[in-house]
Amino acid sequence: MTGETATHCPYCALQCAMSLSPGPGTGQLTIAPRDFPTNRGGLCQKGWTAAELLTSPERLTTPLMRDGKDAPLREAGWDEALATVARRFAELRAARGPDSVAVFGSGGLTNEKAYALGKFARVALGTSQIDYNGRFCMSSAAAAGNRAFGLDRGLPFPVADLDDSEAVVLVGANPAETMPPLMGHFDPARLIVVDPRRTATAQAALDGGGLHLAPTPGTDLALALGLLHVALVEGHLDTPGRVAYRRERTTGWEAVRRCAARWWPERTERLTGVAAADLRRVAAVLAGARRAHILTGRGAEQHSKGVDTVAAWIDLALALGLPGTPGAGYGCLTGQGNGQGGREHGQKADQLPGYRHIEDRAAREHVARVWGVQEAEIPGAGRSAWELLDALGTPGGPNALLVMGSNPVISAPRSRRVIERLRALDFLVVADFVRSETTDLADVVLPVAMWAEESGTMTSLEGRILRRRAAQAPPPDVRSDLEVLHELAVRLGRSGEEFPPEPAPVLEELRRASAGGVADYAGVAPELLDDDAAVYWPVPDTTGSSRADERVGEPVGTPRLFLDRFEHADGRARFLPVEYREAAEMPDAAHPLYATTGRQLEHYQSGAQTRRVPGLRAAAPEAYVEVHPDTARRAGLADGERARVVSRRGAVLARTRYVGDMRTDTVFLPFHFPQAGAANVLTNPALDPVSRMPEFKLSAVRLERADGHAPKEGE
């Protein structure tokens, strides 16, 4: 390779722009940030070091197989590995039916790979049992957005719109650590952070003259209702513009008004711990801003009531007239690199390409025509991610699983249960580019190409479709995910033309399959992406049929949603009345503390990638638990001492880290670490009834001295 390759970071959904160049004499690519509307020439530590993983000695470069369940993994050839996978899948399907084989995907896959994986599951395998790790990301916000607006796109406006916002409320989001370049779009003096912890984002707001509200974990819904109550009774919602907005652009206000009427400030303060004076101050700031935004993150969403919690914040935004108003709005900060596009095109259990619902007859018929199959051949909705993992190897559950680009042993809740279910399978196949805690349980491991070795498209948190470009070839014995799906499909009896091994024809088919859907990509012409046009979905074919150079500087598609109408048939947004309820489990005498989990600056998701980058690993080498000094001392724990954190599902070991501004009833653990430090051993798989999101963000725990003992199985 010679020259620079313009592409995007492989990590979060901000999708920072970067250029890759061959390093002089090193064989390793060098990274330079590119000026782009989202990152503006900035990168975080993860982005700067992303190329190091390409040459990691821990890279998977040849297929691995076991000769028996208890045999070690050994190197194998591709023909042997693929033939074994196809044969075992075919045998299980013949003996136990198509749903005996399941598929688990990833929000990190390109649009083309996500689309091909969904088609592979439903056409080549004939299974309904497919879901992906994005179910653990923003599914609650997606469900609430669909209900309220008729459409779910993380940010229904470009990130740059935040630059001029006079008030931004961040609920359960910590972009200073999870996507640092985004912080350049916020004025700290106008930033209001809602988080039980004083995160780096909350500290940035406080240092700049903004606000930090630290509610009791699990009470964000009540906080939103309390703010809505204050805005209502103090007359902030009575301006002619807001009254007209609710009358002309929404339905359901009266039911929500009655819900909010019961959440006077003092009641809200007793439950949430947020002072009534702060509620009044925040309501006044929001109401007085000409341009304001409310943004939710995983802290609000990863609960068994996540949909209702997000709905309450959307209700507040609608009452203030924000969504669909230029320079204002509600949005969700998508986490994974392609968390947005990854769920739009078919790897989610209940969706078909174009964000079509799998039970909709017209949607099924449209996709069936594109796929060249009968509508009845497309399976119905399968199990959601946790329900799928929990059913593995059980009577009536799948007996084999293909995992592509995910590490559920670390990322799923109640992780010891996940390990148990994976071990119960007859056959486990994992396609990945590094060894992980999940590949270590697999019967077959397939080494696949990494981000800088493949082309395709990604969809960022603002709904912009981006071109990922290959900068170098993968190692000689490594194949792309699309090549793997192509080879397996052929061995399972499908034609090679149905599953192209290259991204260009897959994108062309994706465009046709999504045409007319909510997430319409029909106008995503390759020449637009080659020109680096700003293309935002929905982009129907009439919009994207000509080249971007005919309208230089103008975005293509729909950069700002809802300006004229919402996506419900009547064009109106829906207020959604919600009632507060407690978390699925609460602290008690045996487990008196709230535990919450999240990301830290140096690592990403399960840590399978970032823990293999020497500089990142050195900066954050092990699991830790943030705890108030008084709380730690009551448990007999000194700063820096190893602690056992025990929930009703198990225990983990973590280094005690004193944090003086931590709530005394709350501890925090990052979820990037394996084995004894795997925080998701603790977490609760209780599900939101609508989104099927597990309750990652709240577990009841106690602290103990480790005294050199590892966690006990089943503790």
Image (cartoon, rainbow, N blue to C red):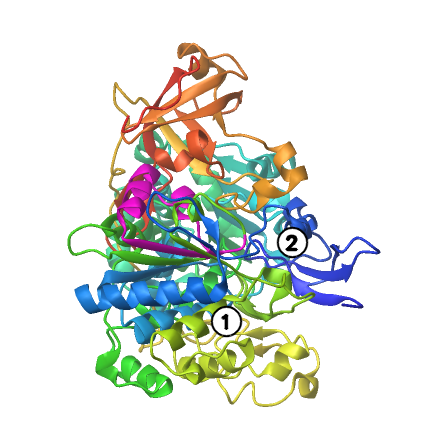
Amino acid on which disc 2 is placed: Leu
Towards the viewer: 92 or 521: 92
Q: CA distance from mark 1 to mark 2?
A: 19 Å
Q: Secondary structure at mark 2?
A: helix
Q: In this rendering, is residue 111 above or below 581?
A: below
- The residue pinned by badge 2 equals 54
Picture coordinates of residue 57, whole percent (x, y): 63, 46
Picture coordinates of residue 552, whole percent (x, y): 70, 81
Q: Residue furthest right?
A: 24
Look at the image and tell me whether residue 23 can be seen: yes
Neighbours of disc 2 within 10 Å: few (<14), some (14-19), many (20+): many
Picture coordinates of residue 362, whole percent (x, y): 27, 83
Q: Is 627 on the left-hand or right-hand side of 311?
A: right
Q: Which quadrant of the figure has residue 87?
A: bottom left
At x 46%, y 38%, the residue is 671
Q: Secondary structure at mark 1?
A: helix
Magenta residues, start to end: 405-433
Compare marks 1 and 2 and give the one earlier in the sequence. 2
At x 33%, y 57%, the residue is 401
Neighbours of disc 1 within 10 Å: few (<14), some (14-19), many (20+): some
- The residue pinned by badge 1 equals 483
| 413 within the magenta span | yes
